[in-house]
Image: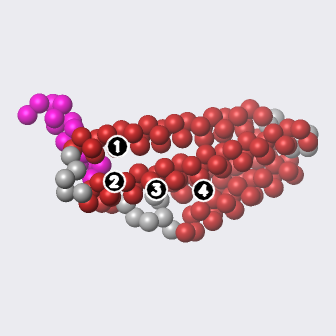
Amino acid sequence: MSSGLIAKSLALAAVMFLVGCSSSEPAGREDQQATAFADLRSAVTETVSDSDRQRDVLAIIDALEKDVDDLRALLVRRRTELRELNADYDATREEFLELAKQMESRIQHSKQRALEHHRKLAATVTPEEWQSLAKVQTRAMKSIAESVQGI
């Protein structure tokens, strides 16, 4: 058996394992994330005194939250499409691999956008403001990670 065929077989097995192990996301995770972002917005309003920068920071947070929502939607879509393909007895290995490749590309792009907004957030506030926002910002990032990991 060629190494390319073995690699493709392992990739297909991994995709099928992920589909089989998928579970629905607890409703509370999205609520926790929304609360964490609301807390972050409140902390920014209290911490960033310059009104122009405050407006910019809040816009970045809005964009970051949209990025996370888009990522969650992509993850749910991947799970759904893989389940549908898995239920199709006529689906080929190539179809699985192509779907996995396409979705991974979209997911990586979405993650990159979120990371860019997080970096922009850090660059827009002063070091003192960043330090003041550290706890609430860390809670928001933790809630994001938990939210998307549960999908």
Q: Which amino acid does label 2 sit on?
A: Leu
Residue 28 image point, x, y percent: 58, 68
> x%, y% of residue 39?
75, 58
Where is mark 4, residue-wise?
Answer: 143
Q: Of the residues shown, which amino acid type is indicated by label 1?
A: Ala
Which residue is more in the foreground, 74 or 129? 74
Q: Nearer the viewer, mark 1 or mark 4?
A: 1
Element assignment for label 2: helix
Q: Which of marks 3 and 2 is nearer the N terminus?
A: 3
Give the residues drawn in magenta, as a range: 1-16
Mark 3, residues whose alpha carbon is within 10 Å: few (<14), some, or many (≥20)? some
In three-dimensional space, the C-alpha distance between marks 2 and 1, rounded to whole angstroms, equals 8 Å
Q: What element carries label 3?
A: helix
Residue in view at x 55 percent, y 36 percent:
112
Q: Circles 3 and 4: CB distance less than 8 Å?
A: no
Name above or below for residue 34 compared with residue 14.
Answer: below
Residue beneath label 1, please?
100
In the picture provided, is 58 more to the left or to the right than 101?
A: right
- Name, please, the residue furthest toward the bottom: 27
Q: Can residue 45 be seen in this view?
A: yes
Q: Residue at x 81, y 55 (%)?
A: 42
Q: Main secondary structure of the magenta part?
A: helix
116 or 102, which is in the foreground? 102
N-terminal of the pair, mark 3 or mark 1, is: 3
Q: Where is residue 37 in the image (x, y as percent from the top left)?
A: 70, 55
For the view shown, which residue lies furthest in the right direction?
50
For the point 22% across and 38% down, which residue is it?
Answer: 8
Q: Mark 3 against mark 4, which lies toward the viewer?
A: 3
Residue on which disc 2 sits: 82
Q: Are dots 2 and 1 in contact, CB under 8 Å?
A: yes
For badge 3, the amino acid type reads Val
